Image (cartoon, rainbow, N blue to C red):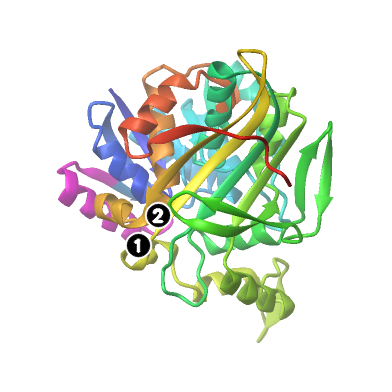
Amino acid sequence: MSRVLVIGAGGVGSVAVHKMAMNADIFTHISLASRTKSKCDAIAASVMERTGVKVDTYEIDAEEVPALTRLIEKVQPALVVNLALPYQDLAIMDACLAAGVHYMDTANYEPKDEAKFEYHWQWAYQDRFKDAGLMALLGSGFDPGVTSVFTTYLKKHHFERIDTLDILDCNGGDHGQAFATNFNPEINIREVTAVARHWENGDWVETPPMSVKQQFDFEGVGPKNMYLMYHEEIESLKTHLPEIKRIRFWMTFGDEYIKHLTVLQNVGMTRIDPVKYQGVEIIPLQFLKAVLPEPASLGPTTKGKTNIGCIATGIGKDGKEKTLYIYNICDHEDAYEETGNQAVSYTTGVPAMIGAALVVKGLWRGHGVFNMEQFNPDPFMDMLNQHGLPWQVKELDGPLTF
């Protein structure tokens, strides 16, 4: 049905391309581009071995807008799927506008020199995409992405009004490393060390990073410590569902991760400002990324499950207050067997494929810049069940007590 160009050859890109190849009736031609072509070639070889589908590969610096525009014009995709670093979002959006092609990503733009995760840079493209008759779909991963669709699904089918929303992200996997991140180390550590923010009664409430901790018993994983953090879907959900009085985001971390991260912070290895070393400027966090295990390499050794979902409290369709928990459980070993990647990449790459499918099939359409919660959740929810991320809804006795 459609040609797509995927940019980014990390774990998420690998999963998305594998899943696209498994749906050749939707994605009739797949191209994959990255700064490192050998990574693209390795993914293409795996896809060919597993599915028999050929993937074209290209080398590209996604921050070079003229070169990327020429590549898009050469490939002629219906959609560019940006699975590269968030720093590159705006450049790729510029290239899509120049080439006249729809755009999609999984994470919002952030500047290199500041750990600041906000949508306003991309929302500012609204008129340019609208006037060009093009669509930009933002945040089609799991969180953001599935968590936003979970919320609108609950609102559509179960609630007259949602008052509070808690997003819970648990990775119960064990990769056997003393310290490693399950997605891009630079992005992961920038997120974790940023000031925590949640939305409450029409305003942002800030707390120091990793200062608010609660324990939650996750099905399939067990009791885990989770920490209050800021995540970009809070910003879009409070904008598009302004009825919600409080939105919080929680992520689990083990004690060993916290211990190592604390030491790295204390010695300056998480800094994102340049320092001089032997006459050369380096960014400590980027150097740390270079010496940490590549997340895509963790697939063969990671065991356990992820559990990611939303707990919503509000007024149900019957007029009574209720609390519902909607979530997915994903097994690291199952994800690796299917795509050669662990579950953290899988839970982002599959929604990227689904979002792309809904755009190219015309089930989600529009001119301008959109977040996931602005569309009908039902076709997305159906595809989650069909393509490896089944979900379930449970009623809880009441809202979270913390």
Residue 60, visible in the rendered structure: no
The image shows residue 130, relative to residue 301, as above or below, that is: above
Verify whether residue 62 appears in magenta. no
Please report contact status of discs 2 and 1: CB closer than 8 Å, yes or no.
Answer: yes
The image shows residue 237, relative to residue 167, as above or below, that is: above
Q: Residue furthest bottom?
A: 278
Q: Which residue is mark 2?
A: 11
Q: Residue furthest top?
A: 318
Q: Residues within 10 Å of mark 1 (few under 14, many from 20)?
A: many
Residue kind at label 2, given as amino acid type: Gly
Q: Residues within 10 Å of mark 2 (few under 14, many from 20)?
A: many
Q: For residue 136, what is the image quadrant?
A: top right
Q: Which mark is residue 299?
A: 1
Q: Residue furthest front?
A: 397
Q: For residue 167, what is the image quadrant?
A: top right
* Position in image of residue 183 (x %, y %): 49, 58
Q: Which residues are magenta?
A: 34-56
Name the residue: 33% across, 39% down: 388
* Position in image of residue 188 (x %, y %): 58, 59
Q: Which mark is residue 58?
A: none
Q: For residue 28, what is the image quadrant?
A: top left
Nearer to us of marks 2 and 1 is 1
Report the side of 156 relative to 195 (left or right).
Answer: left
Residue 389, visible in the rendered structure: yes
3D distance between C-alphas at marks 2 and 1: 9 Å
In this rendered view, identify the residue nearer to me: 139 or 129: 139
Q: Which element type, helix, strand or loop, lies under badge 2?
A: helix
Quarter occupied by the N terminus: top left
Q: How many marks?
A: 2
Name the residue: 20% across, 43% down: 54
Verify whether residue 39 appears in magenta. yes
